[in-house]
Amino acid sequence: MTRFVVRRLAQMLVVLFAVSVLTFLIFNVIPNGDPAVRMAGKTPTESQVEAIRADWGFDDSLPVQYVTTMEKVLGGSAISYFSQLNVRDQIVEGLPRTLSLAVGAAVLWMLAGVALGLLAALRAGRLSDRLLTVLALVGVSLPVFWLGALASYYLGFKAGWFPNGGYVPLTEDPLDWAHHLVLPWTVLAILFIGFYSRVLRSNVLDTMSEDYVRTARAKGLSERQVLLRHVLRNSLIPIVTLWGLDFGAVVAGGAILTETVFDLQGVGQYAAEAVGQLDVPPVLAVTMFGAFFIVVLSTVVDIVYAILDPRIRLT
Amino acid sequence: MALAFGALFVALVLCALAAPLWADLAGRGPEATNVTGKIEVDGRQVDVVSLDGTPIGPQWRSEYFLGADANGRDVMVRLLYGARNSLLIGIAAALLTTILATLVGLLAGYLGRWVDAVARSALDVIWAFPVILLGVALATALAVGGLQIGPFTLEAGSTAISIAVIAVVYVPYMARPIRGEVLALREKEFVEAARAQGAGPLRTMLSELLPNLSSTIVVFAPLMVANAILLESALSFLGVGVVPPAPSWGNMIDAGVERLVTAPHLAIVPGAMLVATVLALNVLGDGVRDAFDPRSRASWGARRP
């Protein structure tokens, strides 16, 4: 077990290193002018440009530049080529917004997905099951940005039920915070609700035909107990691992579209704007941060899975 | 139900192919602007784009069937030409993903050892990026300079860039399950029999393993096309996909969202087309999966943009 954990952690570091190199290369093989000139501001003197160039090592070879840039990114002293703002500060500023969005949406999609999936499984084959299947398929087919834009306009701007985008910190006013986030949560969750309910439905149906469920019924347990204690508990394991991975992806920048449409100014939107300006340090930092989140969560999921299910080969 | 929706998808493709016919009928190409023009409505002359910039709504006749956009372009014509771009990119990207994923899955699963190690690391690295962030980063980088790989040149601003980016981003999601299946198949007797008869690795992979992977590939195909079309629209929406004035559903929605107040049809119509297309593919994929492999875990939703 220890060997397995150590090995997964080593793999994780290698993947993170490769991700950083790849991101760095993506933005360095393209012609994007002299970053030193852009960083120096509107009316730079020659010596200022020279100083920035020396500081960031823009004249050095690519590997040296990579090391300098990564030192700054990991050390928290990287600044944006354009806004000259500290990248770490910007991420720290955007993180509560992204987390607020991700946590709320994740809770919503888990609860709704499990409830609807269970309902569909219990009514398997009947009209309500068919209806839920259709709804789930529609849900996964809706583009987030389109749905978000329409919801924001019709329910927010026109009907006035919700604020028209923007974010209010939780510590400032919890009610207003939730009010601003209801639409983004729902829009982001709909896709996952459709998906999770389908996965849970097929898991429940699979589990119901297992021998131990028959045994539980034979013991005389009530249908309710069989369902909650035996069927649901076992059907939830794959869903929970999926949940961990999806949550990681959403925090890691997977919510770019939702954040942009509702103007939440989270980490994803920050990255999207930086990409558009070919602003390397923020993109590197957010990508590293995002990849870190995804890789750590998938490593944790693997390890937890191996603990829960000893049949899994430890490779 | 799956068949009906499959037919819907085919109908959409046919509509896209027939785009020039409708453009003839409407008398205007997809990029032809008409800001100052007037058309006759109920016997009166009406501005196509009014002085405050509001475009005319649907006319339900050949010219301006679905109204005009802010530049006086015919929305119906753009919708059909946009369908060409969106469907072409989606289908081509899904095809490329399928080819790459099958290749990687076969080689990694069958050859094992260092090939497997390299392939798995490469897949892990792509997989570690959030889908949309990697798509946006690659598309932006390539949009400026294009790319030259050996004899192939991806010109800056061409649809080939979108196709390549989307294809690469989705490879791990398909290559992983295929690799897993190859690992299981490799131990089967018929593979051993082929090897005992003197078949080399290439022959074993192509004539023994590949046919057995076909059901997995067929189950994945519609879902990959749906995912690719959605990602293309998201990239275009963020301004790094199809370059305006060339239309795609994504950049039409992007332009339409800014005019929701005065001309809601500009955002609603291309979005509805997008939903119809993706829904058709998802229902088709669902049906195909039930038919081929009811117990498979191929899934349509995971980690979409």
Image: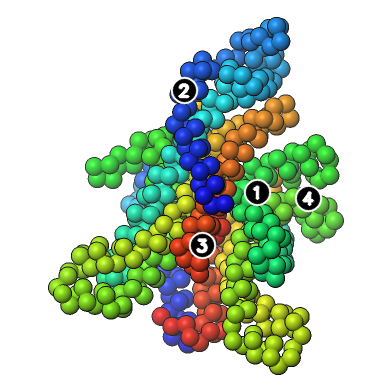
Above or below A78: residue A32: above
Callout 1 crowding tier (Cα within 10 Å): few <14, some 14–19, many ≥20: many
The label shown at residue A180 is 4
Image-quadrant location for residue B144 = top left
Mark 4 near mark 1, Cβ–Cβ under 8 Å?
Answer: no
The CA distance from mark 4 to mark 3 is 41 Å
Above or below A154: residue B25: above
For badge 3, the amino acid type reads Asp
Both marks 2 and 1 on one chain: no
Mark 2 near mark 4, Cβ–Cβ under 8 Å?
Answer: no
Both marks 3 and 1 on one chain: no
Q: Position of residue B6 (x, y in %)?
A: 50, 47
Read off the chain for label 3.
Answer: B
A218 left or right of A143 in image: right
The label shown at residue B39 is none
Q: Position of residue A38 (x, y in %)?
A: 49, 38
Q: Which residue is mark 2?
A: B21
Q: Secondary structure at mark 2?
A: helix
Name the mark nearer the viewer: 2 or 1: 2
**As rendered, which of B6 and A181 lies closer to the eye?**
B6
For badge 4, the amino acid type reads His
Q: Which residue is mark 3?
A: B290
The CA distance from mark 2 to mark 1 is 40 Å
Q: Secondary structure at mark 3?
A: helix
Residue A216 visible in this rendered orientation of the protein: yes
The mark that comes first in sequence, 2 or 3, is 2
